[in-house]
Structures are given as structure tokens and as C-alpha cells.
Amino acid sequence: MSKKDCEKDSYISYDFRIKNRDIYLPVHHTLIPLVKNKRQEIAWALCKVSLTEQRCPGIIMAKIGEKEITWNRKTRCWEEFQRPQLSEKEKEIVRLSIQGFTEKEMSDKLLLSESAIKKRKKILFQKLRVKNMSEAIIYCTNKRLF
């Protein structure tokens, strides 16, 4: 991989909350460098803002080439991020959920029982450390898992 390929695929992101009256909105912000000057400083960048599934703010993550790292606030060090490994069926369940399919429709399409769909969703939620499909969709989208 060339230096330009590494730079093209780099980013830094963090999660924070915005307070609106009594409601806290969880936000995920990503900064993607597009152009650097001669001193390798960022001249142009793309900022992407979306909702996040994270419950606590302050999670900082970066990607340089193929390596993803996360900031450990306790040790004050960067650590390699272990990306959850999803099966093809789990990825398909997320994709079908995004498209609005019900569990019954998913079971017909994937040739699985409804109870098998529910069980796979439960395992998916555990892997991603989320509580529901909305959070799973946001997590998979933000982390580019499929």
C-alpha cells in the first residue's frame, strides 16, 4: 500500500453529546483528511456527523491505512481496535432491517425460522454491545462493518 493510499483511508472520529433542553443527543463526528499541504498539515477535510450508538461520550478512534486504534482514557495510550466479526447472515439481517423488513419477512427471505432470526439478532446485539436494531444499524454504518 502506498503512502497516498494510507492517507486517503485515514480518519479520526469521536463521540460526544449535545444537550437540547433536557435531552442529550449522542453524536458521532468523523474528520477525514482530503488534502495536505507541503508540511503534511491538513488543508482540506471532510466532516461527517451522525448519531452514535455509544452511551458515554469521549470515545476517540482513528484509522491509518488498515490499522484502527482507539484512545484509552485510563492508560492514556492508543490501543488497536478489535473489529467485531459478523457472519454473512448477521450482515444480511442488518441490511434487511435497514430496508424495513420484519422478522417474518427476513425468515422467508433467508430461509430461517423466526426464532432463528431472533436468536441471531440477540447474538448480533451482544457482539456489538447495543440494545436494539436501531443502535446496531448506526454502529455498523459508523464502523463500516458491511
Image (tube, rainbow, N blue to C red):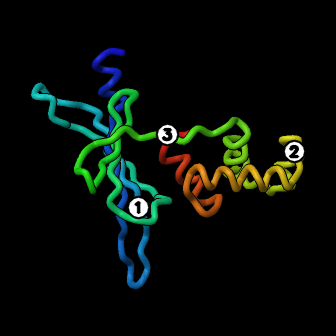
Q: Position of residue 14 (x, y in %)?
A: 34, 53
Q: Would residue 63 be found to the left or right of residue 132 on screen?
A: left
Above or below, comparing residue 2 to residue 127 in the picture: above
Q: Position of residue 25 (x, y in %)?
A: 43, 70
Instruction: Decide if residue 46 is in sight here.
Output: no
User: Looking at this view, is 38 or 143 the one in front?
Assistant: 143
Badge 2: residue crowd in 10 Å (few <14, some 14–19, many ≥20) = some
Q: Position of residue 67 (x, y in %)?
A: 37, 31
Q: Residue at x 54, y 42 (%)?
A: 84
User: Looking at this view, is 91 or 74 the one in front?
Assistant: 74
User: Looking at this view, is 60 or 137 the one in front?
Assistant: 60
Q: Residue furthest front?
A: 75
Q: Would residue 3 be found to the left or right of residue 142 on screen?
A: left
User: Looking at this view, is 52 or 49 the one in front?
Assistant: 52
- Of the numbered discs 2 and 3, the one sitting upstream in the chain is 3
Instruction: Decide if residue 85 is in sight here.
Output: yes
**Residue to which mark 2 is pinned:** 112
- Of the numbered discs 2 and 1, the one sitting upstream in the chain is 1
Q: Would residue 128 be found to the left or right of residue 20 on screen?
A: right
Could you tell me if the residues under marks 2 and 1 are in contact, i.e. CB atoms within 8 Å?
no
Identified by mark 1, the residue type is Val
Distance from label 2 to label 1 (Cα)? 35 Å
- Of the numbered discs 3 and 1, the one sitting upstream in the chain is 1
Badge 3: residue crowd in 10 Å (few <14, some 14–19, many ≥20) = few
Badge 1: residue crowd in 10 Å (few <14, some 14–19, many ≥20) = some
